[in-house]
Amino acid sequence: MASKNLHFAQLLLLTSLLFVVPGHGDVNPGKYPVVVSTWPFVEAVRAAWRAVDSGFSAVHSVVEGCSTCEELRCDGTVGPGGSPDENGETTIDALVMDGETMEVGAVAAMRYVKDGIKTARLVMKHTGHTLLVGEQASVFAISMGLPGPTNLSSSESLEKWTKWRKNQCQPNFWRNVVPVNSCGPYHARDLLGLGDSTCSKSTLLGSIESKSPHIGRDNHDTISMAVIDKMGHIAVGTSTNGATFKIPGRVGDGPIAGSSAYADDEVGACGATGDGDIMMRFLPCYQVLESMRLGMEPEFAAKDAISRIARKFPGFVGAVFAINKKGAHAGACHGWTFQYSVRSPEMDDVNIFTVYPDE
Protein backbone atom coordinates (compact mmCIF):
# COMPACT_ATOMS: atom_id res chain seq x y z
CA MET A 1 0.00 0.00 0.00
CA ALA A 2 2.84 2.38 0.89
CA SER A 3 4.56 1.66 -2.42
CA LYS A 4 1.34 2.44 -4.29
CA ASN A 5 1.00 5.77 -2.47
CA LEU A 6 4.64 6.60 -3.25
CA HIS A 7 4.10 5.77 -6.91
CA PHE A 8 0.97 7.95 -7.00
CA ALA A 9 2.84 10.87 -5.39
CA GLN A 10 5.66 10.56 -7.90
CA LEU A 11 3.16 10.53 -10.77
CA LEU A 12 1.36 13.57 -9.36
CA LEU A 13 4.66 15.47 -9.05
CA LEU A 14 5.66 14.61 -12.63
CA THR A 15 2.26 15.70 -13.94
CA SER A 16 2.52 19.04 -12.17
CA LEU A 17 6.00 19.64 -13.61
CA LEU A 18 4.74 19.17 -17.14
CA PHE A 19 2.69 22.36 -16.81
CA VAL A 20 5.39 24.62 -15.42
CA VAL A 21 6.44 25.93 -18.87
CA PRO A 22 3.25 26.16 -20.97
CA GLY A 23 3.65 26.74 -24.68
CA HIS A 24 7.39 25.96 -24.71
CA GLY A 25 7.59 22.19 -24.72
CA ASP A 26 10.89 22.28 -26.63
CA VAL A 27 12.63 24.70 -24.26
CA ASN A 28 15.99 23.35 -23.17
CA PRO A 29 17.44 25.57 -20.43
CA GLY A 30 20.93 24.36 -21.33
CA LYS A 31 20.68 25.89 -24.81
CA TYR A 32 19.38 29.32 -23.84
CA PRO A 33 20.14 32.14 -24.04
CA VAL A 34 21.68 32.46 -27.53
CA VAL A 35 22.98 35.43 -29.51
CA VAL A 36 23.70 35.26 -33.26
CA SER A 37 24.96 38.10 -35.47
CA THR A 38 26.15 38.66 -39.00
CA TRP A 39 29.93 39.05 -39.31
CA PRO A 40 32.58 38.94 -36.56
CA PHE A 41 31.03 41.84 -34.65
CA VAL A 42 32.35 40.31 -31.45
CA GLU A 43 31.89 43.28 -29.12
CA ALA A 44 28.28 43.70 -30.22
CA VAL A 45 27.56 40.04 -29.52
CA ARG A 46 29.27 40.29 -26.13
CA ALA A 47 27.12 43.29 -25.22
CA ALA A 48 23.93 41.45 -26.17
CA TRP A 49 25.12 38.37 -24.27
CA ARG A 50 25.84 40.32 -21.09
CA ALA A 51 22.31 41.69 -21.19
CA VAL A 52 20.47 38.47 -21.98
CA ASP A 53 22.60 36.35 -19.65
CA SER A 54 21.73 38.80 -16.86
CA GLY A 55 18.05 38.07 -17.40
CA PHE A 56 17.03 40.92 -19.71
CA SER A 57 14.52 40.29 -22.50
CA ALA A 58 15.44 39.35 -26.05
CA VAL A 59 14.26 42.76 -27.30
CA HIS A 60 16.31 44.69 -24.74
CA SER A 61 19.38 42.55 -25.44
CA VAL A 62 19.24 42.87 -29.21
CA VAL A 63 18.98 46.65 -28.85
CA GLU A 64 22.04 46.59 -26.57
CA GLY A 65 23.99 44.57 -29.11
CA CYS A 66 23.12 46.62 -32.18
CA SER A 67 23.58 49.86 -30.26
CA THR A 68 27.11 48.79 -29.36
CA CYS A 69 27.84 48.20 -33.03
CA GLU A 70 26.52 51.68 -33.85
CA GLU A 71 28.78 53.22 -31.20
CA LEU A 72 31.81 51.28 -32.47
CA ARG A 73 30.91 52.06 -36.10
CA CYS A 74 31.40 48.40 -37.01
CA ASP A 75 33.34 48.18 -40.28
CA GLY A 76 32.31 51.78 -40.99
CA THR A 77 28.99 50.47 -42.29
CA VAL A 78 26.99 50.69 -39.06
CA GLY A 79 26.22 53.85 -37.12
CA PRO A 80 27.38 57.40 -37.89
CA GLY A 81 30.45 58.42 -39.86
CA GLY A 82 30.26 55.97 -42.77
CA SER A 83 28.68 55.22 -46.16
CA PRO A 84 28.11 58.74 -47.49
CA ASP A 85 25.39 59.16 -50.09
CA GLU A 86 25.82 61.17 -53.31
CA ASN A 87 25.55 64.38 -51.32
CA GLY A 88 28.14 63.25 -48.78
CA GLU A 89 25.56 62.70 -46.02
CA THR A 90 25.31 59.66 -43.76
CA THR A 91 21.84 58.40 -42.86
CA ILE A 92 20.66 55.51 -40.70
CA ASP A 93 18.35 52.52 -41.26
CA ALA A 94 17.39 50.23 -38.37
CA LEU A 95 14.79 47.68 -37.27
CA VAL A 96 13.76 45.73 -34.20
CA MET A 97 11.21 42.89 -34.14
CA ASP A 98 9.67 41.05 -31.20
CA GLY A 99 9.08 37.41 -32.08
CA GLU A 100 6.63 36.95 -29.22
CA THR A 101 4.19 39.72 -30.24
CA MET A 102 5.28 40.12 -33.90
CA GLU A 103 5.57 43.87 -33.31
CA VAL A 104 8.10 45.79 -35.41
CA GLY A 105 9.65 49.23 -35.13
CA ALA A 106 11.90 50.66 -37.82
CA VAL A 107 13.44 53.84 -39.21
CA ALA A 108 14.80 54.53 -42.69
CA ALA A 109 16.98 57.25 -44.19
CA MET A 110 17.03 58.89 -40.76
CA ARG A 111 19.08 62.08 -40.60
CA TYR A 112 20.82 63.87 -37.71
CA VAL A 113 20.27 61.13 -35.10
CA LYS A 114 22.93 58.45 -34.53
CA ASP A 115 20.87 56.02 -32.43
CA GLY A 116 19.10 53.98 -35.08
CA ILE A 117 18.17 50.85 -33.14
CA LYS A 118 17.03 52.80 -30.08
CA THR A 119 14.79 54.93 -32.29
CA ALA A 120 13.36 51.79 -33.88
CA ARG A 121 12.49 50.45 -30.45
CA LEU A 122 10.78 53.73 -29.54
CA VAL A 123 8.70 53.46 -32.74
CA MET A 124 7.62 49.97 -31.68
CA LYS A 125 6.97 50.93 -28.06
CA HIS A 126 5.30 54.32 -28.38
CA THR A 127 3.48 54.35 -31.72
CA GLY A 128 1.03 52.23 -33.66
CA HIS A 129 3.29 52.47 -36.72
CA THR A 130 5.96 50.14 -38.04
CA LEU A 131 8.28 52.46 -40.01
CA LEU A 132 9.20 56.16 -39.83
CA VAL A 133 11.44 57.74 -42.46
CA GLY A 134 13.70 60.67 -43.22
CA GLU A 135 13.81 63.90 -41.28
CA GLN A 136 10.47 63.19 -39.60
CA ALA A 137 12.01 60.07 -38.06
CA SER A 138 14.70 62.37 -36.67
CA VAL A 139 12.10 64.74 -35.24
CA PHE A 140 10.38 61.79 -33.56
CA ALA A 141 13.64 60.47 -32.10
CA ILE A 142 14.64 63.84 -30.64
CA SER A 143 11.15 64.40 -29.24
CA MET A 144 11.47 61.05 -27.44
CA GLY A 145 14.67 62.15 -25.73
CA LEU A 146 17.45 60.84 -27.96
CA PRO A 147 20.37 63.22 -28.65
CA GLY A 148 20.29 65.35 -31.79
CA PRO A 149 20.40 66.97 -34.21
CA THR A 150 23.91 65.70 -34.90
CA ASN A 151 26.09 65.75 -37.99
CA LEU A 152 26.42 62.05 -38.86
CA SER A 153 29.34 62.56 -41.24
CA SER A 154 32.96 62.01 -40.21
CA SER A 155 36.31 63.10 -41.60
CA GLU A 156 36.69 59.60 -43.06
CA SER A 157 33.31 59.61 -44.78
CA LEU A 158 33.84 63.09 -46.20
CA GLU A 159 37.30 62.15 -47.47
CA LYS A 160 35.85 59.09 -49.18
CA TRP A 161 33.11 61.23 -50.73
CA THR A 162 35.60 63.86 -51.96
CA LYS A 163 37.72 61.22 -53.70
CA TRP A 164 34.60 59.78 -55.31
CA ARG A 165 33.61 63.21 -56.64
CA LYS A 166 37.07 63.67 -58.12
CA ASN A 167 36.59 60.34 -59.90
CA GLN A 168 33.55 61.72 -61.77
CA CYS A 169 31.21 60.13 -59.21
CA GLN A 170 32.08 56.62 -60.35
CA PRO A 171 30.90 54.00 -59.60
CA ASN A 172 27.28 54.90 -58.85
CA PHE A 173 23.80 53.44 -58.83
CA TRP A 174 22.40 55.24 -61.88
CA ARG A 175 21.56 53.50 -65.15
CA ASN A 176 20.05 54.42 -68.50
CA VAL A 177 20.80 58.09 -67.91
CA VAL A 178 22.95 60.86 -69.35
CA PRO A 179 25.48 62.39 -69.07
CA VAL A 180 28.11 59.69 -68.65
CA ASN A 181 31.20 59.94 -66.44
CA SER A 182 29.84 62.95 -64.66
CA CYS A 183 28.36 63.87 -61.30
CA GLY A 184 25.05 64.87 -62.85
CA PRO A 185 22.41 66.10 -62.69
CA TYR A 186 21.23 63.04 -64.58
CA HIS A 187 18.35 62.75 -67.03
CA ALA A 188 16.57 59.72 -68.43
CA ARG A 189 17.83 58.90 -71.91
CA ASP A 190 14.29 58.22 -73.13
CA LEU A 191 13.12 61.72 -72.20
CA LEU A 192 15.84 63.17 -74.39
CA GLY A 193 14.97 60.96 -77.34
CA LEU A 194 18.03 58.86 -76.79
CA GLY A 195 16.54 55.41 -77.04
CA ASP A 196 18.57 52.45 -78.19
CA SER A 197 17.76 53.21 -81.83
CA THR A 198 19.19 56.75 -81.66
CA CYS A 199 22.71 55.63 -82.41
CA SER A 200 24.27 58.95 -83.39
CA LYS A 201 23.10 60.89 -80.31
CA SER A 202 23.84 57.95 -78.06
CA THR A 203 27.37 57.84 -79.38
CA LEU A 204 27.73 61.59 -78.86
CA LEU A 205 26.58 61.66 -75.24
CA GLY A 206 27.39 58.09 -74.31
CA SER A 207 25.31 55.73 -72.26
CA ILE A 208 25.46 54.25 -68.81
CA GLU A 209 24.93 50.53 -68.74
CA SER A 210 23.31 48.82 -65.82
CA LYS A 211 26.04 48.34 -63.27
CA SER A 212 26.35 48.04 -59.54
CA PRO A 213 29.25 49.20 -57.41
CA HIS A 214 31.25 46.41 -55.85
CA ILE A 215 29.35 45.10 -52.85
CA GLY A 216 31.54 44.19 -49.91
CA ARG A 217 31.95 44.57 -46.17
CA ASP A 218 33.83 47.84 -46.61
CA ASN A 219 31.07 49.68 -48.43
CA HIS A 220 27.79 47.87 -47.96
CA ASP A 221 26.87 45.94 -44.87
CA THR A 222 24.43 45.44 -42.02
CA ILE A 223 24.54 44.09 -38.52
CA SER A 224 21.62 41.72 -38.23
CA MET A 225 21.30 40.10 -34.82
CA ALA A 226 19.02 37.53 -33.23
CA VAL A 227 18.64 36.84 -29.51
CA ILE A 228 16.81 34.03 -27.74
CA ASP A 229 16.38 34.89 -24.07
CA LYS A 230 16.14 32.60 -21.04
CA MET A 231 12.37 32.32 -21.48
CA GLY A 232 12.75 31.17 -25.08
CA HIS A 233 11.45 34.46 -26.51
CA ILE A 234 13.13 35.67 -29.69
CA ALA A 235 13.92 39.11 -31.08
CA VAL A 236 15.92 40.44 -34.02
CA GLY A 237 17.48 43.80 -34.74
CA THR A 238 19.37 45.45 -37.57
CA SER A 239 21.32 48.65 -38.13
CA THR A 240 23.18 50.06 -41.11
CA ASN A 241 24.15 53.31 -42.77
CA GLY A 242 23.39 51.77 -46.13
CA ALA A 243 25.16 51.55 -49.45
CA THR A 244 28.09 53.88 -50.06
CA PHE A 245 27.30 56.61 -52.63
CA LYS A 246 23.65 55.65 -52.75
CA ILE A 247 21.16 58.02 -54.37
CA PRO A 248 19.77 60.26 -51.59
CA GLY A 249 16.51 58.84 -50.28
CA ARG A 250 17.44 55.25 -51.04
CA VAL A 251 16.28 52.67 -48.50
CA GLY A 252 17.68 49.16 -48.58
CA ASP A 253 16.52 46.02 -46.82
CA GLY A 254 17.80 47.02 -43.36
CA PRO A 255 14.48 48.36 -42.02
CA ILE A 256 12.29 45.88 -43.94
CA ALA A 257 10.87 43.08 -41.78
CA GLY A 258 11.21 39.74 -43.54
CA SER A 259 14.16 40.89 -45.60
CA SER A 260 17.03 41.92 -43.30
CA ALA A 261 15.63 40.01 -40.33
CA TYR A 262 12.59 38.17 -39.03
CA ALA A 263 11.61 36.47 -35.79
CA ASP A 264 8.80 34.26 -34.55
CA ASP A 265 8.84 32.54 -31.15
CA GLU A 266 7.08 29.55 -32.69
CA VAL A 267 9.85 28.98 -35.25
CA GLY A 268 13.13 30.86 -34.80
CA ALA A 269 14.92 33.79 -36.40
CA CYS A 270 16.90 34.88 -39.43
CA GLY A 271 19.32 37.71 -40.25
CA ALA A 272 20.59 38.86 -43.65
CA THR A 273 23.34 41.00 -45.15
CA GLY A 274 24.44 41.93 -48.66
CA ASP A 275 22.90 43.66 -51.66
CA GLY A 276 19.70 44.84 -50.04
CA ASP A 277 18.26 46.34 -53.22
CA ILE A 278 18.04 42.83 -54.65
CA MET A 279 17.47 40.84 -51.47
CA MET A 280 14.45 42.86 -50.36
CA ARG A 281 12.61 41.72 -53.49
CA PHE A 282 12.64 38.15 -52.14
CA LEU A 283 12.11 38.62 -48.37
CA PRO A 284 14.72 35.93 -47.68
CA CYS A 285 14.34 35.91 -43.90
CA TYR A 286 10.59 35.47 -44.10
CA GLN A 287 11.25 32.62 -46.51
CA VAL A 288 13.74 31.04 -44.10
CA LEU A 289 11.26 31.05 -41.24
CA GLU A 290 8.42 29.66 -43.32
CA SER A 291 10.69 26.86 -44.51
CA MET A 292 11.67 26.06 -40.92
CA ARG A 293 8.01 26.24 -39.91
CA LEU A 294 7.37 23.43 -42.40
CA GLY A 295 10.10 21.32 -40.83
CA MET A 296 13.21 22.28 -42.78
CA GLU A 297 16.46 22.41 -40.80
CA PRO A 298 18.22 25.82 -40.56
CA GLU A 299 21.02 24.86 -42.97
CA PHE A 300 18.66 23.86 -45.76
CA ALA A 301 16.24 26.71 -45.10
CA ALA A 302 19.11 29.22 -45.42
CA LYS A 303 20.46 27.62 -48.58
CA ASP A 304 17.00 27.49 -50.14
CA ALA A 305 16.37 31.20 -49.52
CA ILE A 306 19.73 32.19 -51.02
CA SER A 307 19.30 29.91 -54.04
CA ARG A 308 15.94 31.50 -54.87
CA ILE A 309 17.69 34.85 -55.27
CA ALA A 310 20.71 33.45 -57.12
CA ARG A 311 18.52 31.81 -59.75
CA LYS A 312 17.15 35.21 -60.75
CA PHE A 313 20.26 37.32 -60.03
CA PRO A 314 23.38 35.12 -60.44
CA GLY A 315 25.67 38.08 -59.80
CA PHE A 316 24.18 39.15 -56.49
CA VAL A 317 26.17 39.14 -53.24
CA GLY A 318 24.48 38.24 -49.98
CA ALA A 319 24.09 35.90 -47.03
CA VAL A 320 21.69 34.80 -44.29
CA PHE A 321 21.95 33.03 -40.97
CA ALA A 322 19.12 30.92 -39.60
CA ILE A 323 18.45 29.75 -36.05
CA ASN A 324 15.51 27.64 -34.96
CA LYS A 325 13.75 27.85 -31.61
CA LYS A 326 15.86 24.95 -30.32
CA GLY A 327 19.05 26.95 -30.87
CA ALA A 328 20.35 25.09 -33.93
CA HIS A 329 21.91 27.52 -36.39
CA ALA A 330 23.47 27.66 -39.86
CA GLY A 331 24.32 30.10 -42.65
CA ALA A 332 24.32 30.32 -46.42
CA CYS A 333 25.83 32.80 -48.87
CA HIS A 334 26.35 33.65 -52.52
CA GLY A 335 29.11 35.70 -54.16
CA TRP A 336 31.33 36.00 -51.09
CA THR A 337 32.55 34.15 -48.01
CA PHE A 338 30.31 34.88 -45.05
CA GLN A 339 31.00 34.79 -41.32
CA TYR A 340 28.55 34.94 -38.45
CA SER A 341 29.04 35.10 -34.68
CA VAL A 342 27.39 33.01 -31.96
CA ARG A 343 27.41 33.04 -28.15
CA SER A 344 25.59 30.36 -26.18
CA PRO A 345 25.91 28.82 -22.68
CA GLU A 346 28.32 26.06 -23.73
CA MET A 347 30.78 28.62 -25.16
CA ASP A 348 33.38 30.51 -23.14
CA ASP A 349 33.23 33.43 -25.55
CA VAL A 350 31.91 34.39 -28.97
CA ASN A 351 32.54 31.80 -31.70
CA ILE A 352 32.92 32.72 -35.37
CA PHE A 353 31.46 30.42 -38.03
CA THR A 354 32.64 30.65 -41.65
CA VAL A 355 30.33 29.82 -44.56
CA TYR A 356 31.54 29.36 -48.12
CA PRO A 357 29.36 29.92 -51.19
CA ASP A 358 28.13 26.87 -53.06
CA GLU A 359 29.89 26.37 -56.37
Image: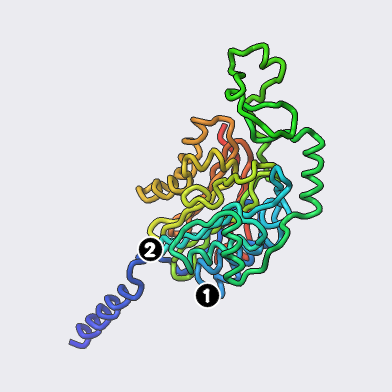
Q: Quadrant of residue 35?
A: bottom right
Q: Nearer the viewer, residue 123 or 46?
A: 123
Q: Nearer the viewer, residue 118 or 191?
A: 191
Q: Quadrant of residue 120?
A: bottom right
Q: Residue at x 62, y 57 (%)?
A: 351
- Residue 73 got which mark? none
Considering every residue shown, the one lying at the far bottom of the view is 2
Considering every residue shown, the one lying at the far front of the view is 192
Going from N to C along the chain, the mark reached first, 1 or 2, is 2
| Residue type at the position of mark 2 | Asp
Applied colour scheme: rainbow
Within 10 Å of disc 1 (Cα), the crowding (few <14, some 14-19, many 20+) is some
Quick one: quadrant of the C terminus?
Answer: top right
- Residue 55 got which mark? 1
| Residue type at the position of mark 1 | Gly
- Residue 26 got which mark? 2
Q: Residue at x 54, y 43 (%)?
A: 332
Quick one: quadrant of the N terminus?
Answer: bottom left
Query: So how many labels did they put on this image?
Result: 2
Q: In 3D space, how far apart are the residues under numbered discs 1 and 2 (Cα atoms)?
A: 20 Å
Q: Quadrant of residue 263?
A: bottom left
For the question of whether residue 177 can be seen, the reply is: yes
Query: Quick check: 15 above or below 253?
Result: below
Which element is circle 2 on? loop
* Residue 316 percent across, percent down from the top left: 58, 34
* Residue 60 percent across, percent down from the top left: 54, 69
Q: Are marks 1 and 2 in contact (CB under 8 Å)?
A: no
Considering every residue shown, the one lying at the far left of the view is 1
Query: Quick check: 190 above or below 359?
Result: above
Q: Nearer the viewer, mark 1 or mark 2?
A: 1
* Residue 159 percent across, percent down from the top left: 81, 47
